[in-house]
Image (cartoon, rainbow, N blue to C red):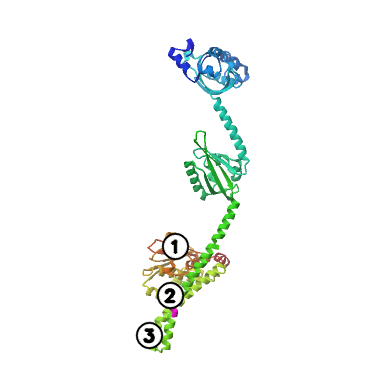
Amino acid sequence: MGGAETAGDTSDQELFNGTDVSLWVEDFTAVTKALDALRSSGVEDLRAWLAAHPGFVLEAAGWVKVLDVNDATVRLLEARDRSEVLGTLPRFFAPETAKAFAAELLLLWEGGTRLELETVLQTLGGRRIDVTLTLTRPAKERSDRVFITMRDVTASKASQRALQESEARFRNMADHAPVMLWVTDATGRCVYLSRTWYEFTGQTEAEGLGFGWLQAVHPDDAEPSGAVFLAANARRSAFRLDYRLRRRDGEYLWAIDSASPRFGPGGEFLGYIGSVIDISERKQVEQERERLLAAMDEAIRLRDEFLAVASHELKTPLTPLNLKLQTLARAVQERRGPELLERLPADLEVMQRQVKRLSALVGELLDVTLISGGQLRLELEPVDLGALVREVAARFDGESQRTATPLQAELDEEVVGLWDRVRLEQAVSNLLSNALKYGVGRPIHLQAGKEAEHAWLTIRDEGIGIPPEALDRIFEKFERAVSERHYGGLGLGLYVTRQNVRAMGGSIDVRSTLGQGATFTVRLPCRVPGVNALREQAS
């Protein structure tokens, strides 16, 4: 390359001088001879030998001859022409440069052919510059010749140092801030969490960075919070979200996480910087206020709805009962004896049915009062479940025949347990009444049996069924799966039934397909806990 020894032709010399990258050609002949002499003297570990003889590095640098440089090197080293650069190296050494030259000596010692490193040089004008060097040794027959490519990285190094200083100031500020701060890169991965985050959550840096911070978010909030964050990251837009954050003691507290996007000088998206603030106290106040408001609203709604439904339901049996009594009274006054005797049985049946319905409604209201007040009491005694179901079913024979809704029973013998007969009868009666109401005109299937220490009872109808969204709420007070206008009722039957079953240590569930009926299953332990435990469950 340069001069008579390095240029093969004029075009090569023009290419050598024309490039913007600093190029050097150096002769290491004297250095190579010195290293060979050291090897001959028995030196095996050059690195250790250099550590013991630090002056050798600068001495060896003085033996290197700079054979040629290009114009970019002349400008970089602030020389007037090439002649000021040619010669020995130490003129350009800063204290850090000796370490880089020691690496070159090790390259030669080990027979390497390429080395890349960063170091500092000193220009002829006395200015320090940061550079990156690439050293290449050519073919073996010219192994003493070394070619160097050099780039000035002073500006980028200064920028990097400024960035590091700025980052250090930010970290110091963030670590002492009263809120938790965080920073992400453009991919959304967290690259920094302030000390306050680690103190609050108990996470380590390895656990929190990346997407590990989501592990400290409540399981129910982690997925939606991550989705909101990633969506905002894709849009490069600010965001704010609330989630429950696990404190180091395991308790979850509400926090606000908000962030704004960061952009570089060229407008490129760099990621986010955000803060997390503990708002648990404020959230508790808000939730309590909302709860109370929802409860002055729900209570009023339930009261008004209940009063309207109760008034309607109580009037429903009273109206036909009153009409029948008025008709009978007129017949007596008009002394229509034969007519009165002829219609009396049918009228009495209607009146008895309405009185029974009225009594059931009043009974449900009383039961709800007892349950709500924790005053439900159980009288436990041996009860045969199959026999009890038969007795209850027999009471519905009239309604079953009247509505053409047959009752089909498959009941095992001797299914005996320690239960409250009255409460169990009430539960079976409520379930059977519901089946007759919603499955009218189609068979009702009753089954009872025993598995291990538990008895079970199923009542299945083939009626209208229950919508999926109503399956969980039909056992609550004043709830129905259908409109009361079409089917009536206070919406208390299933609530009272579940409370009775639970009081005896059992459970009740329902399966249904809309339009294909519903199956209610009651499970009861044949031996239940003591009375005190039952009373606690009932309350």
Q: CA distance from mark 3 to mark 2?
A: 25 Å
- Mark 3 vs 2: CB contact within 8 A: no
Q: Which of the numbered marks, if any, corresponds to residue 395?
A: 2
| Residue 104 in the image: above or below residue 389 | above
Q: Amino acid at mark 2?
A: Arg
Residue 441 lies, in percent from the top left, at: 36, 70
Task: Place residue 467 in its image quadrant.
Answer: bottom left
Q: Secondary structure at mark 1?
A: strand
Q: Residue at x 62, y 17 (%)?
A: 55
Foreground pick, 463 / 36: 463
Residue 468 drawn above or below residue 180: below
Q: Which residue is mark 1?
A: 510
Residue 288 falls in which quadrant of the image?
Answer: bottom right
At label 1, which amino acid type do we have? Answer: Val
Q: In the rendered structure, which segment of residues is drawn in magenta?
A: 316-322
Asked whether residue 512 is in view, the answer is yes
Q: Where is mark 3, residue-wise?
A: 342
Residue 367 locus on image (x, y percent): 52, 70
Q: Is residue 424 visible?
A: no
What distance separates the C-alpha of mark 3 from that of mark 1? 45 Å
Q: Nearer the viewer, mark 3 or mark 1?
A: 3
Residue 321 magenta: yes
**Sequence-wise first label, 3 or 1:** 3
Give the residue type at disc 3: Glu
